[in-house]
Image (cartoon, rainbow, N blue to C red):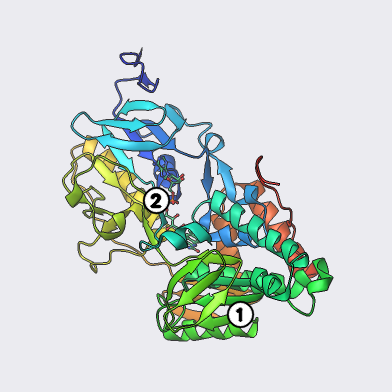
């Protein structure tokens, strides 16, 4: 075993005679691949800019003060504690030098035999600088905590507002994007508005927040069936959410959102869930990219134009044999692609033929609030309380870590019986008051 010390800028990881696989990003895809390559005979390096794995499907519950952030995060070092020849580096990958099989990161350079890019996606604002500046998003836990703090601060500031128009502006919440994230945060905020706000802020009891959900298409949840979309809209409206379909946000400033219908809403909280694009790592050929910054891969997850560089999950787009839009950017695609790649990497070293990817759609679901969810499994669609229990069970089982499962279960049970939420603390880093 020799140490790589040939350059001061090199990440110091023992070089062995094993082939080295570098996994960039430890989300659903990276985590699954890392786990599946245990005892595979490769040296594994995992590089992530965070030292934890996060569970985005429950971000909206943290944003709406229903769960503590720590219950949906899991430390990477704990996950891989007992894995031999696994090396984790908390660093941000900046670029790939595919000629020299090298990766440039904020912690230095590192060489690879096989490189797997699984660094996910971020928000796309379709070029609107104002929307990027003034809206809150839910793509990372940092954004989610910022959203939660702003939401709670707006309630506090509404109590000390100078006049009624300022108070109402602070109590208006505009959610842009009626996909699962938009629908779920709208439902959670409606519940908070109904059960928590009147108790915490008795002065606002008769006023309450107004929640608007805006969707440009002709229905919310447009990746689901017409019936599920209608049910979700009905559930939301019953919970007090104002749903606008066929309505496009055309711009905003610090306290107003403008729409193509001519409507304006004055608001202290814009939540953006409408657009997504790939996280950028430099160095790959421009024709390896499709629109939205996704990397084009073949059915073995190999990036177009490269033999030993792969992409998985949200950052990739696989169109061969399916529609030109590729697979949906959801957890199951990332997990299934990672499982197959773990087998194919072993096959490559054994000179065996590779297996092609086929996506097995396990279904889609979204929850709209207590006892309300729409669920579409491959052979059956249902909604309401049964759907809600199925949604809870599946999400609970998918969370990493027994302690996290237990904490979330207790939180949900507490909330079910008390109509109360556990976390309404405004905690901000140094520099904020
Ligand atoms: C709010 C929200 C709700 C969602 N709800 C659902 C749902 O209910 N069901 C569902 O199936 N899907 C849901 N999704 C989508 C799902 O989360 C994604 O499809 C899935 O996370 C994709 O997995 P991934 O491994 O490709 O990327 P990610 O899970 O995004 O992981 C990417 C990782 O890469 C790291 N990273 C990024 N850039 C760099 C860099 N330059 N250097 C180093 N590390 C980097 C990040 O820190 C992260 O750990 C939701 C997404 C969001 C945002």
Q: Would you identify the image quadrant in which residue 39 lies?
A: top left
Given this view, does label 2 or label 1 mark the residue nearer the observer? 1
Question: Around disc 2, counting alpha carbons within 10 Å, would you say few (fewer than 14), some (14 to 19), or many (20 or more)?
Answer: many
Q: Is residue 312 left or right of residue 386?
A: left
Q: Residue furthest front?
A: 162
- Disc 2 residue lies near ligand 1 with CB under 8 A: yes
Q: Secondary structure at mark 2?
A: loop
The quarter of the image holding the N terminus is: top left
Q: Is residue 227 left or right of residue 207?
A: left
Residue at (60% x, 53% y) in the render: 146
Residue 281, horizontal then vertical, whole percent: 32, 43
* Viewer can see residue 38: no
- Mark 2 and mark 1 lie on one chain; the one further toward the N terminus is 2
Q: Which mark is residue 120?
A: 2
User: In front here: 196 or 77?
Assistant: 196
- Mark 1 = which residue? 241
User: In front here: 431 or 293?
Assistant: 431
Residue at (61% x, 59% y) in the render: 63
Residue 326, horizontal then vertical, whole percent: 28, 64
Give the CA distance from mark 2 to mark 1. 31 Å
């Amino acid at each position: 075993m020799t140490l790589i010390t040939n350059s001061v800028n090199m990440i110091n990881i023992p070089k062995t005679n094993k082939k080295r696989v570098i996994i960039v990003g430890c989300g659903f895809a990276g985590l699954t691949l890392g786990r599946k390559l245990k005892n595979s005979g490769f040296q594994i390096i995992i590089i992530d800019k965070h030292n934890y794995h996060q569970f985005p499907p429950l971000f909206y519950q943290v944003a709406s003060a229903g769960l503590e952030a720590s219950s949906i995060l899991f430390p990477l070092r704990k996950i891989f504690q007992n894995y031999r020849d696994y090396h984790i580096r908390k660093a941000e990958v900046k670029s790939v030098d595919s000629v020299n099989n090298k990766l440039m990161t904020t912690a230095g350079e590192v060489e690879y035999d096989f490189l797997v890019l699984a660094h996910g996606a971020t928000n796309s604002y379709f070029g609107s600088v104002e929307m990027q500046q003034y809206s809150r998003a839910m793509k990372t836990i940092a954004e989610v905590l910022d959203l939660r703090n702003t939401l709670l601060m707006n309630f506090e500031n509404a109590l000390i507002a100078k006049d009624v128009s300022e108070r109402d502006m602070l109590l208006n919440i505009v959610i842009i994007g009626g996909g699962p994230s938009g629908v779920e945060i709208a439902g959670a905020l409606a519940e908070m508005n109904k059960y928590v706000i009147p108790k915490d802020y008795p002065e606002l009891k008769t006023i309450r927040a107004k929640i608007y959900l805006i969707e440009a298409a002709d229905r919310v949840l447009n990746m689901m069936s017409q019936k599920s979309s209608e049910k979700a809209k009905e559930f939301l409206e019953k919970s007090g959410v104002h749903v606008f379909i066929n309505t496009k946000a055309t711009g905003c400033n610090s306290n107003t959102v403008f729409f193509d219908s001519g409507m304006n809403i004055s608001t202290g909280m814009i939540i953006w869930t409408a657009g997504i694009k790939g996280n950028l790592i430099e160095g790959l050929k421009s024709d390896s990219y499709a629109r939205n910054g996704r990397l084009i891969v073949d059915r073995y997850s190999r990036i177009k134009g490269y033999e030993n560089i792969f992409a998985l999950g949200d950052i990739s787009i696989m169109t061969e044999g399916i529609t030109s839009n590729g697979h949906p950017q959801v957890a199951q695609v990332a997990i299934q692609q990672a499982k197959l790649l773990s087998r194919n990497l072993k096959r490559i070293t054994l000179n065996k033929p590779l297996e092609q990817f086929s996506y097995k759609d396990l279904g889609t679901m979204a929850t709209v609030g207590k006892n309300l969810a729409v669920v579409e499994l491959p052979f059956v669609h249902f909604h309401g309380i049964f759907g809600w229990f199925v949604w809870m069970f599946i999400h609970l089982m998918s969370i990493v870590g027994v302690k996290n499962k237990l904490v979330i279960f207790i939180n949900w049970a507490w909330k079910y019986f008390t109509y109360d939420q556990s976390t309404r603390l405004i905690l901000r880093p140094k520099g904020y008051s």
